[in-house]
Amino acid sequence: SKCLKQADVLMAMYLFPSRFSDDEVRQAWDYYLPYTTHDSSLSKAIHAILACRLGEVDEAWRLWLETSRIDLDGGAAEGIHIAGAGGNWLVMVRGFAGLASPLESPIPSLDPKLPAQLSRLAFRHFWKGTCLHIEIDRERVLVANEGDQASDVSVRGTVKTVPPGRSETWEDR
C-alpha cells in the first residue's frame, strides 16, 4: 500500500514556495493528500498553509481546527506539544495572514486570506530588529511600526514605507 506519515513532499513546497508554481503545488496536493495519514502532528499545519496558497481557505480552516485541538483533546499526555503549537502559529501567520518567509521576500510581505470564521487576526512580527504590529480584518491591513527604523512593507504587492512610531493602512480591494 502507499501511505505517507506526513507532508514530506508538500513540506519542500512550503519551505521553498518560489521554486514551485501553483500548478505544481496543486498537482502534488491532489496526488499526495489521499495517501497522507497525518500521523505527524505537524502534517496538517503544513497542509493548511498550502491550502491557503491554493485558495482552499475553508479546507485550511478545517485542517487548522483539527491540528489546534491536539493539546486540548489530550493528544499530548505529558503537556503541551510545543512543535504543534508552533505549527498552529505558522498556519495563522504564514497561511491566513500570508506572511512570506524572509527567504522569499526582502521586506515583510503579506497576502492575507482570512477564513469566514475569523473576523480579525493580529500579531507582532520582528523584522531585522524592528517590531511591526500587524492587524488584518475584512476591510483592511494595518501595520504599526513599534521600532526606531522605517520599514518597507508589502501587502498584496503594494509597498508602503512605515515610519517609526507610525502606522500604514492598506484597504481591502
Image (cartoon, rainbow, N blue to C red):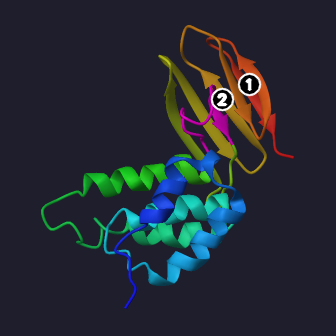
Question: Mark 2: few, some, or many residues within 10 Å (few <14, many ≥20)?
Answer: many
Residue 137 percent coordinates (x, y): 69, 47
User: Along the horizontal axis of the image, is 71 left or right of 25?
Assistant: left
SS state under label 2:
strand
Of all residues, the one furthest to the bottom in this rendering is 1
Region rendered in magenta: 97-110
Up-down relation of residue 121 to residue 7 (above or below): above
**Quadrant in which residue 5 is drawn:** bottom left
Q: Which mark is residue 143?
A: 2
Question: Mark 1: few, some, or many residues within 10 Å (few <14, many ≥20)?
Answer: some
SS state under label 1:
strand
Residue at (34, 54) in percent of width and height: 85
Up-down relation of residue 27 to residue 16 (above or below): below
Of all residues, the one furthest to the left in this rendering is 78
User: Along the horizontal axis of the image, is 40 left or right of 129?
Assistant: left
Q: Amino acid at mark 2?
A: Val
Residue 97 appears in view: no
Q: Which mark is residue 168?
A: 1
Residue at (38, 82) in percent of width and height: 3
Q: Amino acid at mark 1?
A: Glu
Asked whether residue 67 is drawn in magenta, I would say no
Per the picture, the main secondary structure of the magenta-coloured stretch is loop
Q: Are marks 2 and 1 in contact (CB under 8 Å)?
A: yes
Residue 149 vs residue 50, the one in the foreground: 50
Residue 24 vs residue 166, the one in the foreground: 24
Looking at marks 2 and 1 on the same chain, the residue that comes earlier in the sequence is marked by 2
Residue at (71, 64) in percent of width and height: 23
Quadrant in which the N terminus is drawn: bottom left
Residue 163 percent coordinates (x, y): 68, 12
Residue 61 vs residue 121, the one in the foreground: 61
User: Along the horizontal axis of the image, is 48 left or right of 105?
Assistant: left
Disc 2 versus disc 1: distance between alpha carbons?
Answer: 6 Å
